[in-house]
Amino acid sequence: MAGDSKHPVDGVKTVRLRLLRGRRDWCLIFRMNATHYTTDVLVIGAGIAGLMAAAELQREGRRALVLDKSRGVGGRLASRRIDGATFDHGAQFITARDPRFVTVLEQGRQKGAMEEWCRGFAGADGHARWRGMPAMSSVAKHLAVGLDLLLETPLLALRRTDDGWHAETTTGRTFTAAALLLTPPVPQSLALLDAGGIVLAPELRTRLDSIEYERCLAVMAVLDGPSRIPPPGGLTPVDGPIAWIADNQLKGISAQPAVTIHATHAFSVSHWDLDRHESGRVLLDAAAQWLDAGVKTFQVHGWRYSKPMRVEEEHCVVVSQSPPLVLAGDAFAGPRVEGAARSGWAAAAAILKANA
Ligand SMILES: Cc1cc2nc3c(=O)[nH]c(=O)nc-3n(C[C@H](O)[C@H](O)[C@H](O)COP(=O)(O)OP(=O)(O)OC[C@H]3O[C@@H](n4cnc5c(N)ncnc54)[C@H](O)[C@@H]3O)c2cc1C
């Protein structure tokens, strides 16, 4: 664990998560004040793939340290508050088919971190859609409890050493690890490998280079009255620039009327470099039939890597067996939140096997 490291690391943002674990953990935080850290497995990314992998590695007795460049955990499991309204602006709901993942969601339900939202949008299809409680980021916060992680710590450079990996962050911290797991979207992971001079087999490189992601401009609008979106609060228009529109109040996560609008990939690509506020207005105009209320304020977020357009057959990619270097995330093991979780587990298993 973090406190066992030779030169532990400072991480102010870890405090909030560690508070959930009780007073004992304060000791660990204060012992993490240094610039170099040694661990068994360095996990890059505190999205669902990284969190699931780290939890599994920790269960198997490995020290796993998770780094994320963002201020919070969750990656694309993202929520935001604007003027008293709450928005999920990344993943909208979670589905689960794998019994192991169903168990994770059930455990989260018992802890009050998630619950079933509905059983379908255009009529019930019997399949549960889950939402985070009070919002989607709570799912990640729940899964992060008990893990060692450093936020606002972007990985900058990697280097293979004689018996493992050396990593550096933009914050000037350095890390030594026996194994490395990269869970950012594939193009970002490849850029990190390139920066570290880590060369992939040509066939693997070509395959990974061909994984593209949809882009998504997401509008979060606070309304001055209820929307016209019917229960349970989300729908997929048949045509136009909107891929998805949801009423966060009907969904049960916002005290104020608040809608999330996701643009289609085509609209997002064509408007990516244009004024975000203007693009937001175009999307709000396109959504007029579902709003039925004035827009008090709105923000626009751009997801460059929203969902992979193609998913690899392998559940993770082992770039190097010794020392272990593995790539995981939602481009493997099936897309979306459940696929990312399964990829995280596969990556943990691959690292445990390589390290055996
Ligand atoms: C708009 C949108 C709508 C979606 N809707 C749904 C939905 O309804 N249902 C569903 O199941 N899925 C949905 N998804 C997809 C789902 O969110 C993802 O499949 C899943 O969250 C991916 O998890 P991940 O761990 O693979 O990646 P991520 O969540 O992207 O995690 C990767 C993490 O790596 C971090 N990172 C990147 N580079 C670095 C670096 N250099 N140093 C340190 N950290 C770094 C990032 O900050 C991030 O936290 C949606 C996604 C988007 C964007």
Image (cartoon, rainbow, N blue to C red):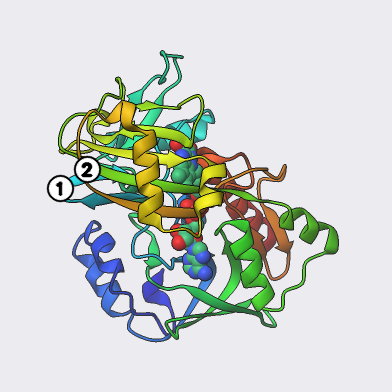
Q: Is residue 227 visible?
A: yes
On screen, residue 200 versus residue 146, left or right, reads: right
Residue type at mark 1: give it: Gly
Residue at the image position 39 percent from the left and 19 percent from the top: 119
Figure disc tally: 2
Helix, strand, or loop for circle 2? strand
Helix, strand, or loop for circle 1? loop
Q: Is residue 54 above or below residue 298?
A: below
Q: Is residue 165 above or below residue 14?
A: below
Image spot of residue 288 (x, y percent): 32, 31
Residue at the image position 67 percent from the left and 56 percent from the top: 353
On screen, residue 284 versus residue 157, left or right, reads: left
On screen, residue 243 versus residue 347, left or right, reads: left
Image quadrant occupied by the C terminus: bottom right
Q: Do the CB atoms of the residues marked 1 and 2 lie less than 8 Å apart? A: yes
Residue 276's disc number? none
Image spot of residue 136 (x, y percent): 34, 43
Image quadrant occupied by the N terminus: bottom left
Residue at the image position 57 percent from the left and 43 percent from the top: 266
Crowding at dot 2, Cα within 10 Å, few <14 / some 14-19 / many 20+, comes out as: many
Q: Quadrant of residue 98?
A: top right
Residue type at mark 2: give it: Val
Image spot of residue 336 (x, y percent): 53, 40
Where is mark 1, residue-wise? 84
Residue at the image position 41 percent from the left and 50 percent from the top: 279
Where is mark 2, residue-wise? 222
Image spot of residue 120 (x, y percent): 42, 20
Task: Tell me the distance, in whole angstroms, between the alpha carbons under discs 1 and 2.
Answer: 9 Å
Q: Quadrant of residue 46?
A: bottom left
Residue placed most toward the observer, 263 or 9 = 263
First in residue order: circle 1 vs circle 2: 1
Q: Is residue 63 above or below residue 197?
A: above
